Structures are given as C-alpha cells and as structure tokens.
Amino acid sequence: MSIFGNFSSTSLSLSDAENILATGHDIHLTTIKAGYPVAVLKDVSLKIPTAQIVSVLSNSATTKLALLQLFAGLNTPTQGYIAVDGQRIDHLSANKLAQYRKQEVGWVAESQNLLPALSIEKNLHLPLWINNSAVESDFYQEIVDLCELSPYLKWLPEDASPLVCQKTAIARAVLNRVKLLVCDEPTANMDTKDAKEILGLLDIIAKEQKISVLLGTTNPVTASFSSYMYLLRDGIIAGEINAPNLEAVLVATQTFELDFS
C-alpha cells in the first residue's frame, strides 16, 4: 500500500480508443551535444486516457523532462508522432503550436513559475489576461475553492508555503479549461502530508474536471499514485504497470534495474 494512505488506483484498459485523450507513438528525440547527436528518447510509445492520471517514472530527470515537454508542446520529436484530442501536434506550425499551449494543455513545472511581484490572485489571472480571455467567475471560484486558495489570494508567493504555491500553479493551468495537464515533479521537496494533498488534488481535478494528467517523476512513491504507470529507463519504455501500488512499483524498478539512489 502507498504511504499516502487511502488513495486507490483505477484499473484501466488502454485498448479502448474512445477513452484515450493523447497518444505518443514511436517517439524519438535526438539533441546535439558537443557537436555530436545524442539520443534522448528512443522508440517511446504511450497512451493517456481521459480523466485519469498517467505517471512516467524515470531514472533520469533529463529524459523524463524531455518527454513531458513534447506533450506540453514545448518541443517536437525528431521522429514519431504525438496526438492530443485527435490533433497531431508534432508537425504543427509555430503559431498553431502556440495556440495549443494556450488552449489545450496546462504545464505545471517543478518550480511553479509564479511571478514573485504578483499576488496569488493575479498569478491565477495572468494566463487569462495574456490570452485575452474573459474570467468565468463561477468556474474561477470553483477552482479556487477546490484548491483551497481563498485565504491566500492577496498574498505574494514569497509569503506562501510551497504547498500553496504549487496549488496556485495547478489552478492557474486548469483555469484555461485545458484537456491535458502535464506536471513535472509536482511533489518535489514536499513532506508526505503536503505531497498527499497535491496528489489528491490532481486526482480530484482529473475526475471532476475530466482532465487527463501526465505526471513525470523520479520518485517511485509519487509514481505509485496513478491509474497507469510507464517506466522510462535511459530514454526507453522499460515496462508498464496498470493500477500501480508502491510495492509493485518498487518490484518493477528492481526488475528493470532502475536506479533511484
């Protein structure tokens, strides 16, 4: 059982295309380092079902981040395709890819990326202002209440706890009414209590808001809180677990020789 208590994973069938929001197939990513090509991702394929959390547990923060950035529209693969809600995003023009980032996907970075000079409330509104989108007052209040941010709206990020700042980053992404939420290490540097709260919040958002969550981590405990998990070793999918729990994840990391020390 996960140390996070009573969370339960839902057993999934990834063969039902109607329940799949996003797909990556035969993804390769090559970068240039010191003048030489370096393969970062190799033949990676995965599916992300609607309204569920899918985790990617990696022994490398670099390869994990590279995969997340592809689904967030922050980079494009060297080979292969990525489709989200029926749209291929791997060969979109720069303008259409920018629209995808604004309207379809939410990005939650490990560092939260809140503007320190703006209050929590203004940080929440910032993407809507940038996109010239009207604030839907009812939906805004629903998300603020869901993330329990009302007491902190006038606070600056430096005065708020890491938990409140991460909730703000998640709420800010969700307020754009995205279909896919990509989270990089959402529980990094948190104690067990705060990590449990963030993962519980992501679970509620996925189920109640019908948002798919792609969660990348190097922490087996965090990865165990998902409906489906992929093990990424040295840029290759080394295994998959349906409805993972911590015991199964730890066994799998040993079986596939993932070193998290």
Image (tube, rainbow, N blue to C red):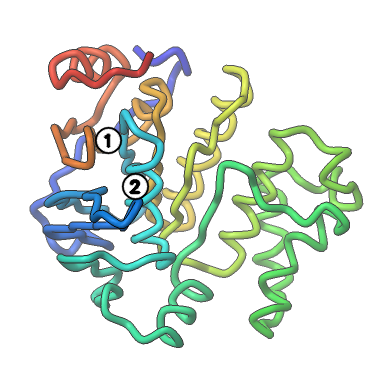
Residue 37 locus on image (x, y percent): 23, 55
| Residue ID at (62%, 18%) | 191
Q: Is residue 172 left or right of residue 236?
A: right
| Residue ID at (55%, 51%) | 108
| Mark before the other along the chain sequence, 1 or 2 | 1
Residue 194 locus on image (x, y percent): 63, 25
Q: Is residue 43 left or right of residue 195?
A: left
User: Circle 2: is it few (<14), some (14-19), or many (20+) Cα within 10 Å?
Assistant: many
User: Circle 1: is it few (<14), some (14-19), or many (20+) Cα within 10 Å?
Assistant: some
Question: Label 1's element?
Answer: loop
Q: Is residue 101 left or right of residue 212?
A: right
Residue 105 locus on image (x, y percent): 45, 65
Q: Is residue 190 above or below residue 60?
A: above
Furthest-right residue in view? 154
- Contact (CB < 8 A) between labels 1 and 2? yes
Q: Is residue 142 left or right of residue 39?
A: right
Residue 106 locus on image (x, y percent): 51, 61
Q: Quadrant of the C terminus?
A: top left
Task: Tell me the residue that label 2 is attached to.
Answer: 52
The tag on residue 10 is 1
